[in-house]
Amino acid sequence: MLETTIAAIRAADEAAMAAARELHGRLTKPAGSLGALEELSVRLAGLAGLCPPPLPEPAAVAIFAGDHGVHAQGVSPWPQEVTAQMIGNFLAGGAVVNAFARQAGASVTVVDVGVATPLPTDPAVLEPTAVDPAVLDPAVPRLVVASVRRGTRDLTVTAALTRDEALAAVQTGIRIADELIDAGAGILLTGDMGIGNTTPAAVLIAAFTGADPLDTTGRGTGVDDPTYARKVAVVRAALARHTPDPADPLGVLAAVGGLEHAALAGLILGAAARRTPVLLDGVIAVSAALAAAALAPDAVCAMVAGHRSAEPGATVALRHLGLDPLIDLGLRLGEGTGALLALPVVTGAVRVLHEVATFDSAGVAEK
Amino acid sequence: MLETTIAAIRAADEAAMAAARELHGRLTKPAGSLGALEELSVRLAGLAGLCPPPLPEPAAVAIFAGDHGVHAQGVSPWPQEVTAQMIGNFLAGGAVVNAFARQAGASVTVVDVGVATPLPTDPAVLEPTAVDPAVLDPAVPRLVVASVRRGTRDLTVTAALTRDEALAAVQTGIRIADELIDAGAGILLTGDMGIGNTTPAAVLIAAFTGADPLDTTGRGTGVDDPTYARKVAVVRAALARHTPDPADPLGVLAAVGGLEHAALAGLILGAAARRTPVLLDGVIAVSAALAAAALAPDAVCAMVAGHRSAEPGATVALRHLGLDPLIDLGLRLGEGTGALLALPVVTGAVRVLHEVATFDSAGVAEK
């Protein structure tokens, strides 16, 4: 499944990109006056192989949730149970991601890909479905249980995952992408939940970019100085123990990743294979995007960087991917919140190519 | 009317701001993890005097259009007729501002406050109305004719406006703010159209901030090097001729402003007097905001900077106002487009205070 998906990922369509650039020059606005939105719309034309590309609607957020053995090293001040408790909050519609998704008209799919503690029982929990437009209902957050194991192993002691476990999580991500796109989604947004998950993200970013752990490790949900020092030491120790090889992306995900990171890499690859844009959230998403790009370099054509997380590793990863984020407001929440804030910018960029009059049609003089 | 409006503008309500900060600490997210959105929501609580402040809905864009005598100095490559032609485009729904407004569900009111050439006749043109919810219909752009004079005088030769003309334009802006808020608008967005209007904006910003014309003058719709040099010289000459006194804001607007700049200053003051947020677009808006803040310093409490225009003067003005923009994507189109892109961020910031569960109510453990 992974190999088929990778084989389906193609480079951007140059003709569609040229057509979008040419169209921009005829619309009733000074050339270039929409700044980064113009190039974004050109990229999306290249991805779709069409000018104008389809409006990225409806939008679907996929939140992959997992826990982390490295939590035992004291890298986060939050108890591990919060991962499962926040899933309850997502399904009840009470989290920030829900508020932003309701505003944007986006559906929310929560995927337990490896939560350690029991999920809250909730009558609103739905079973995974086959092709079903109801999975895109913005009013009903949905839970898919696809647990690979109840949290990763402690990466300071051993590999976080076996290679098979990492592959299973990647394939879950691909399956969710396919399911959402089959149901009609025009854009996928990455979300994540997992107490401690900025630690494996920092290791992944260091492994794929070669950056120093000091530059890839941040304060996550807000750790104090001693915890931060411990976190950097953990990242450094993980790199020393596993010497992850970026030429073997699945091996890197297995050694030092998380189940949600691996699943997000799969979601990104799945979207790229279907020529559907995937709007990246914060540091967890961009660490997964590095793995996806290592597996299939052309997958970058499908990626749109939603925002610049306050986590320093996010900036390192975005630079490596050659992506400029759309929003830069110091967010560090995850869940998909930064991607949702950026969604109207993406939609607006495409809408211009669909709806704006040309100088000719509007009878407006040119300079 | 101006004096009454200024007298009604009050400082932010500290108790409401404290309540918003306290509420943020109880919501199911790490403290501070929403970055700039948290402080934005606190500011809007302070403006409304309520926590949570009302959702900023519905949104109303007011595009003030005017022409400029200084166009005769060759500061723009576009013919002056484009101002009127673009009004036709706005009313037909074909401009970028229309595409973004449809997406955001915002109404568009176009105000001719001083266009030089004849407006296009169009059966869809509506008369100005009294309190009427139909003025907020996002599907029907509306034209209000409130022309003070058919374009300003050439500010390199004489004062652009008499003091009475500048006052009339400011009062038109206040009247439009009142009308939109009376009709139910929860937030006003500034828009502008006027070939040549970045030149008076550059003079206004230099006059109110003391910055050098080289730092306040940009390339507007995209002028070549000789035109840019001429534009800077024009800005410098205007300052030398009029020596505008920032302690007399109406005098500054009259000497070196534009009718749309003056009207926008009025719109901002009108919104502030009604404790309604006003989302600023680009360089024209922030030059007008400087005049509004000079007339009533507490008006800044109502201002939200939508985006950082590519025009350098916008950054100078925002710094002077102490405002950080929400979006920074190199836009330089005007019309209200940058404000519309930022609108979901503002709405999202407020929505968090309305809809997100607390740790207590959601049964989520704290760190």
Image: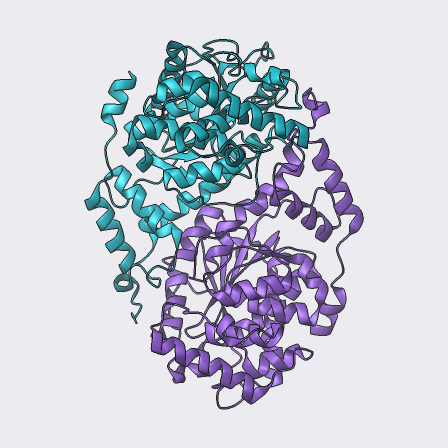
Chain colours: A purple, B cyan
Q: Quick check: can you spot residue A130?
A: no
- Tell me if B187 is positioned left or right of A260 in this view: left
List the single residue furthest toward the right. Answer: A15
Is residue A111 depicted above or below B178 in this figure? Answer: below
The number of numbered badges drawn on the structure is: 0
Name the residue located 33 percent from the left edge and 49 percent from the top edge: B39
Q: Please, is residue B339 above or below residue B64 in the view?
A: below
Which residue is located at x 51 percent, y 73 percent? A202
Residue A119 at x, y percent in the picture:
40, 73
Find the residue positioned furthest to the left: B15
Q: Residue at x 66, y 22 (%)?
A: B78
In-image side of A358 versus A235 (left or right): right
Residue A183: x %, y % from top left: 61, 56
For the point 56% across and 75% down, the residue is A206
Q: Most extreme residue toward the front, as rendered?
A: B240
Q: Quadrant of residue A116?
A: bottom left
Looking at the picture, tell me which residue is in the foreground, B235 or B187: B235
Quadrant location of the N terminus of chain B in the rendered image:
top left
Give the camera-side residue of B159 and A156.
Answer: B159
Residue A123's quadrant in the figure? bottom left
| Residue B335 seen from this side | yes
